Every structure is written in C-alpha cells, then in structure tokens.
Amino acid sequence: MPTHVPGPRIAVVGGGIGGLAAAAFLHRAGLTATVHEQAPALAEVGAGLVVAPNAVRLLRRLGVMPHFTRQAVPLDWGWEFRRWADGSVLSVEKLSGVCERLYGERTYVIHRADLLDTVKAAVPGDWIRLGARCTAVEPRPDGALLHFADGSRAEADIVIGADGVHSVVRNTLAQPAPPEYSGICAFRTIVPAHSAPDFALRPAQTLWLGPGRHFVHYPIAGGSAVNVVAFAPAGDYTDESWSATATIEEFHAEFAGWDRRVTDLITAGGIPGRWALLDRAPLRHWSRGRITLLGDAAHPMFPFFAQGAAQSIEDAATLARCLAESVDDPEQALKRYESARIERTTRLQQVSHARRDINHLPDGPEQQARDATLAGSDPLVNNGWIYGHDAEEALIS
Ligand code: FAD
C-alpha cells in the first residue's frame, strides 16, 4: 500500500479511462486527488477496445491484472486484414508468444466498461465525486479555482483536465474552439456469441478493407460477445453522441456488396450505435502554470491505431511520476510531463490520421500496392515504437 503524505490538492476533471488512470497512478505514487466526473455514475459505452502491450505493462504495475484478465480476451490468434469483396486474406500476423517475446506482454481486447472497472479498482472510492460538471477553471497564482454546474467550487493546487475531446479545461490553456468533424462516422454493435459466426469468435482482430470504408471485429467480455466497429463516410451526419443510433438498414447500405460474413455480422448485431469522429490538430503545448491536460483532452486521435485510451494511460503514469518526483515544484513537474509526452502523442495523432486514407483506398493500382505492402509487412515489429514504449522508464532514460 502506498504511504500518503499531505501533499498538493490535485483535481482531476473527468472520470473516464484517462482520469481514473491518473488517479490510480497518483495513488500508487503516494499522492492524493479528487476526480470530478460530470456523470451521475461511472460508466462506459457499450463498445470494445484493443489494449496493446504499452498499456498492459502499466496496468500490471497498478496491480489490477487479475481484474483485467477476468474479462479481457488475449488476441492470441492475432490480427488479420481481409479484402472487402471476397474475404481473401491480405495479411495475417499471429501474436501468441511473439508479443510477449518482443514486448513482455500480450495484446488484449476488452469491453470499455470492463477496462474502466479495472482501472477504477486501483482508485480509492472516496476520491471520486460524481455529478460534478466542471464549467470553468480559473487560474490562480498557486493553483486554480474550479467552478461546477451546480454552483459549487473547489480550490486545487494542481488541475489535470481529463475531460475528453470537448474539454473545458483545455479552454483555459488554448484558444477555445470546437473540434472539427472528420467526415467519417463509426457504426458499432455488439453481437452475442450465440448469434455470432464461429470465425468471429476466434481470438483475432479482423479488419476488412474496402473503398471508403473499413470494418473491424473481435471478441470481448471473456468471449461472450463480438465487438463490431465499422467506419464509413459521414455525409452530413455530425452527431457524435455515444448514445446516437442508426438503423440496421443504414448500416447495411454502407456495406452493401461486401463479403457475406460482414453483412451477416451486421444483421446479427441489433440496433447499431453511430457517431461522427471528431478531429483536432495537435496542440503545441498543453500545460500552463499548474494546469495540464491528459488523454483525449490533450491529443484526441482517430482510432485507427487503437491507441487513444492506451495513450491516456501512458500520460497518467508519466504525469504521476513527474509530480511525485517534483512535489515542491508542480510547474516544473507539469513541464517535464508535457515534454516527455508531446512528441509521441503528436506522432500517434499524425499516423492515425494518415491511416484513414490508406485503409479506405478505392480499388485500383494504389489499393493493389497497399495490399502487396500489407502482405509483406510485420505491424507488430514495425510498430515497436508504439508497443515497446515504457512510459515510466522513458522518463529515466
Ligand atoms: P473520455 O473517455 O472522453 O473521458 C472523459 C470523461 O470526462 C468522461 O467520463 C466525461 O463524462 C468526463 N467529462 C467531460 N467533460 C466534463 C466536465 N466538464 N466536467 C466533469 N467531467 C467531464 N483507444 C484504444 O486505446 N484502443 C482502442 O481500440 C480504441 N478504439 C476506439 C474506437 C473508437 C470508435 C473510438 C471513437 C475511440 C477508440 N479509442 C481507442 C480511443 C479511446 O476511446 C479514447 O482515446 C479514450 O476513451 C480517451 O479517454 P479519456 O479519459 O481521455 O476521455
């Protein structure tokens, strides 16, 4: 158990995966914090996440692996790319054994709610304040004053904005501007295992690539369901609420003519969720004085490298260590945190952005060249800079 000494009053705004990870790592470092979450209960939307070794090694240090592995599915089969029209395999990479050998951890897939629960298990319950929607953060010479929608206020010595892509805290640090619509929307659905075809129950992440669209699925919830997420042009659709839905017919219309295995999964899934992906250019700075950002508030990214939540966990680990090692000089700690993180997260924002065009090429010579490259590529090794990274060790070297 960490020993807690009276330290700075740290306010974390947002109790998503990033905010709770920040609280968990602060707790491990012997500091204390309050998490202010706007929702009346901690919850995550019904969808899945890939958790790569760079995040798994940090979860292990939080001591939550028994909790995590109860629901997470190790991607032992690996990942595979298939062609939209006939399902022919463009590339396949087995992960079992290889991932551990290269990076010391496996890659998993998990329901978002299960990951949130896992991280929450490492946070003292009385640190979390629910129904607390922050409306403004007023910088003060030695901290900040937080204002909430119910009229309450809280003083803090340090503020961590983990309040997602619409961050209110970000408005204190950067020119307030709404995120832009990316022109892409995501359909998501969860198929119960008993309705899913066998091939979708393999511990594999399968990505079907087609013109202007791609379709992804993998098992979650201990193998009791299949997570489906598919990306298509958004047209004039701009609703990015996690609770917005589409009809099965709209989902089918986007993937008409695709391999039967894709369309069967759409049929099996029930009413799909649909939301527009948002976009923001990378920030040049995200800390000022004693206020900083973390996760999507700092660096939202397209989900095409499946790294957004993982990066928020990395941020949390780095930030907690910087604060613990420089507890008397929080401004210096926040500067050190930002400079340790910004280059890496900016690069991930950029490569995730570029992946959109690559995944969505129309059939033709460029698509054939992409498929030939995929056939000879080794994403696990090529992306070693992502999966091999240790967010705590990187501070020391
Ligand atoms: P959020 O999850 O947005 O959490 C913000 C929290 O702050 C919420 O709880 C919110 O209620 C609260 N909040 C907001 N405003 C306020 C306020 N004013 N006051 C108080 N509380 C507030 N990442 C991966 O690592 N792997 C994947 O496979 C993956 N797949 C994805 C697939 C899709 C389709 C999408 C869209 C994203 C995916 N991501 C993935 C990215 C990942 O979902 C995000 O990067 C991650 O959830 C960010 O976490 P966060 O805690 O920073 O922000």
Image: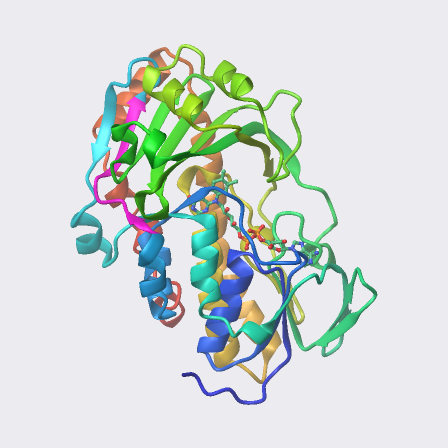
Q: Does 145 sit above or below residue 2?
A: above
Question: Is residue 378 part of the magenta span, yes or no?
Answer: no
On the picture, is 154 further left or further right than 259?
right
**Extreme-front residue of the structure:** 194
Q: Nearer the viewer, residue 78 or 140?
A: 78
The picture quadrant where one finds residue 365 is top left
Give residue 259's position: percent from left, percent from top: 34, 15
Give residue 349's position: percent from left, percent from top: 49, 43
What residue is drawn where x is 27% and y is 44%?
A: 75
Quadrant where the C terminus is found in the figure: bottom left
Q: Does 29 sit above or below residue 252?
A: below
The picture quadrant where one finds residue 234 is top right
Q: Does 366 sit above or below residue 46?
A: above
Q: Does 180 sit above or below residue 64?
A: above
What residue is drawn where x is 68% and y is 58%?
A: 38
Q: Which residues are magenta?
A: 72-82
Q: Nearer the viewer, residue 202 or 34?
A: 202
